[in-house]
Image (cartoon, rainbow, N blue to C red):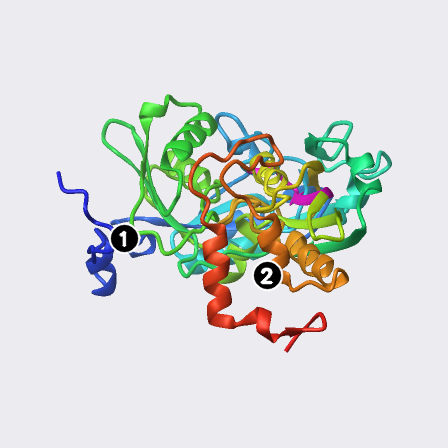
Amino acid sequence: MKLDVVGKSVIRVDGLSKVTGKAIYPQDIYMEGMLYGKTLRSTKPHAYFKLDISEALKIDGVVKILTAKDVPGLNSHGVLFKDHEVLCNKKVRRVGDPIAFVVAESEKAAEKGLKAIKVEYEEIEAVFDPSEAMKDTAPQVHDGNSNIVYHYKIRKGNIDEAFKACDVIVENEYYVPMVDHVFLQPEAGIAYIEEDGTIVVAVATQYPHFDQIEVAEAMGVPTEKVKIINPAVGGAFGGREDITMQIHLAMATKITGKPVKAIYSREETFEAHCKRHSVKMKYKTGATKEGKLLAMEAILIGDTGAYASWAINVMRKAGVHATGPYEIPNVKVDSYSIYTNNPFAGAMRGFGATQVPIAYEQQMDILAEKLNMDPVTFRLKNIFKVGSETATGQLIDESVPLDRCIEEVEKKMNFIERFKGGVAQ
């Protein structure tokens, strides 16, 4: 078997079908006699609610309206914690929570059915700032004693004594907002029943094996009676790792006995899927007058919104990467995942490692400026090399070409020559 593929042009398996327009996406699939589904979503961030679907059921073409009472198995799902409801029962925790699923003979009829459903809300206090949500007095997003989903710690060396030995210390707070994946293809799918009773859901997803388990649990059937088909995916970037319409479609086709299709609008897709975690970052970093880093302390507060999704993994990785590619002998990191009533956050490319560079790299620039040292030289003094130890105690014993990378960039930018008096020209 030939393995010399690096640097070679390789045709992607799915490339030709996509550029020629022959690729089949979920919204391209049509089946005879299929019905259409539309999701009714909460317009309140935190509230108890009551539904009245009686008038909606009278709409010509409306076949069925699914609510929480129609979920045959577990009315819960979630990649780490089962904290999402398939269809909310009594309480909503964010704008966009699904509370009913209208099944109709046409998209137009389904839309009319949505508008005819009456929702009575009893709003309750919500919390949108994760720092406030951490307090004991904050409204509880989920039943329990705390909105703190997860707390990750790193302790290395003696942080207090190290800061006493620093000649320069920089303290700052940084913030990065939630980000949407904005993939080109909105969520879409179709479900149907095979002759042996197997429920088939064709949907663009990143985790068909997880979907199979979660659909089976909600439907109250063995996993072998659920089949997930993944047609062409029009972008994902982490945004298709959580359940959106999969269970709704499975329920609808099982109850009606007919294929059921759904396509989200662009507005609905913004409400339905997860976001990149917004993170508040408080940093304190110290160095000697020679430009050697001695200590770094970081507090990272990640807003996971109304549901956990991958919160533990994301904020653990943010904590692990909080010191960046720098060798720092004394480190203290506290990284938190916090429930709020904001849109829920989950996976997005980088998985927590992308937020923290905004903070630690600015800390490096400010330290260099205070030492009247160009930022390139300052970094070269502190980056990982073979034999370095990370904040978590990992020894780096393989090639670490960071110096070569920085020096190559410096050759192109001529940054050191342009740096005069602490200001880049």
Q: Which residue lies at the image location 86% right of the left edge and 36% below the top edge?
A: 137
Give percent across and percent down for residue 325: 57, 46
* Region in magenta: 295-310
Mark yes or no: residue 277 visible: yes
Q: Residues within 10 Å of mark 1 (few under 14, many from 20)?
A: few
Q: Which residue lies at the image location 84% right of the left edge and 41% below the top edge?
A: 164
Mark yes or no: residue 340 visible: no
Give percent across and percent down for residue 81: 58, 30
Mark 2 or mark 1, earlier in chain: 1
Nearest the camera: 40 or 214? 214
Q: Label 1: state its secondary structure.
A: loop
The quadrant of the rendering that contains the C terminus is: bottom right
The numbered mark at residue 391 is none
Nearest the camera: 241 or 421? 421
In this rendering, is residue 179 above or below 150? below
Give percent across and percent down for residue 72: 48, 27
Q: Which residue is mark 2?
A: 376
Q: Label 2: state its secondary structure.
A: helix
Q: Residues within 10 Å of mark 2 (few under 14, many from 20)?
A: some
Q: Which residue is mark 1?
A: 30
The quadrant of the rendering that contains the N terminus is: top left
Label 2 vs label 1, nearer the camera: 2
Q: Which amino acid type is shown beneath numbered disc 2?
A: Val
Is 171 in the magenta? no
In this rendering, is residue 221 above or below 297? above
Describe residue 396's horizontal placement relative to residue 340 as left or right.
Answer: left
